[in-house]
Image: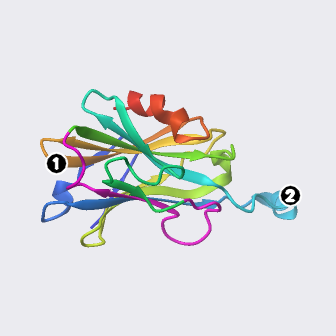
């Protein structure tokens, strides 16, 4: 059974499965906010929202080591892979996914921060039903989910973090507002949440 997290809650992924985790997917989904009220329906709203899920990889000293995003779909060591850019947010399920092979991840890596930003500068007040989740790739089972209800005039969000401690991984729902149009704009804010 998946754990539904609120902002700043943490869950041990080891306790969510009866075996050792070897590979997980960080999935992100969203919908375009539909206009509300008479004038909103009359004049319509955005047809698409181009959000970008990214992973920032940190060592134990909280130094950024690598990034995975739509312009770099794989980490330099090959352990983390982005499945590609969704330019609209249309469709059901995850709009963007980042796959992590935990067995290939270098021992020096202790934190992976999942961020979401608007490359076109669209703000989160134009987004509905946004979420982040972590899935066990071996079983396909969702281990934890974080629904984002924080809309506003920001262009980015530090969504969640994966942290390794003593060989076990924890998933923390962060949900911190940020501004930036690429993952590089969010690196400082991501380091501060660790």
| Residue 29 forms part of the magenta stretch | no
Residue visible at 75% across and 58% down?
A: 46
Q: How is the image coloured?
A: rainbow
The image shows residue 171 at horizontal and vertical percentages of: 30, 48
Give the mark nearest the N terminus, 1 or 2: 2
Provide the secondary structure element on which disc 2 rests.
Answer: helix
Crowd class of label 1 (few under 14; some 14 to 19; many from 20; radius 10 Å): few
Q: Main secondary structure of the magenta part?
A: loop
The residue to which callout 2 is attached is: 39
Q: Which residues are magenta?
A: 85-107
Where is the C terminus found, in terms of image quarters?
Answer: top left
Can you give x and y, in whole percent of width and height, for residue 142 in the image? 32, 66
Q: Is residue 143 above or below residue 119?
A: below
Residue 40, given in percent of the width and then of the height, sits at 81, 58
Which quadrant of the figure contains the N terminus? bottom left
Q: Could you tell me residue 106's position as x and y percent? A: 22, 45
- When asked about the image quadrant of residue 16, the answer is bottom left
| Left or right placement of residue 153 versus residue 161 in this view | right
Residue on which disc 1 sits = 168
In the image, which is nearer the foreground, mark 1 or mark 2? 1
Let me know if residue 157 appears in the view: yes
Secondary structure found at label 1: strand
Q: Residue at x 54, y 50 (%)?
A: 71
Residues at discs 1 and 2 in contact (Cβ within 8 Å): no
Residue 7 seen anywhere in this rendered image of the structure = no
Alpha carbon distance from label 1 to label 2: 51 Å
């Amino acid at each position: 059974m998946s754990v539904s997290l609120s902002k700043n809650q943490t869950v041990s992924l080891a306790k969510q499965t009866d075996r050792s985790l070897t590979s997980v997917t960080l999935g992100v989904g969203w919908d375009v906010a539909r206009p509300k009220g008479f004038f909103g329906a009359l004049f319509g709203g955005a047809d698409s929202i181009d959000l970008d899920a990214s992973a920032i990889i940190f060592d134990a000293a909280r130094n950024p080591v690598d990034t995975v995003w739509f312009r770099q779909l794989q980490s330099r060591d090959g352990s983390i892979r982005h499945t590609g850019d969704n330019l609209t947010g249309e469709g059901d399920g995850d709009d963007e996914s980042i796959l992590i092979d935990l067995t290939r991840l270098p021992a020096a890596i202790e934190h992976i921060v999942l961020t979401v930003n608007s490359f076109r500068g669209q703000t989160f007040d134009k987004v509905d039903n946004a979420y982040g989740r972590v899935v066990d790739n071996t079983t396909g089972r969702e281990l934890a989910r974080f629904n984002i209800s924080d809309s506003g005039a920001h262009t980015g969000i530090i969504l969640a973090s994966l942290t390794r401690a003593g060989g076990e991984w924890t998933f923390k729902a962060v949900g911190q507002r940020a501004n930036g149009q690429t993952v590089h704009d969010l690196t400082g804010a991501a380091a501060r949440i660790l």
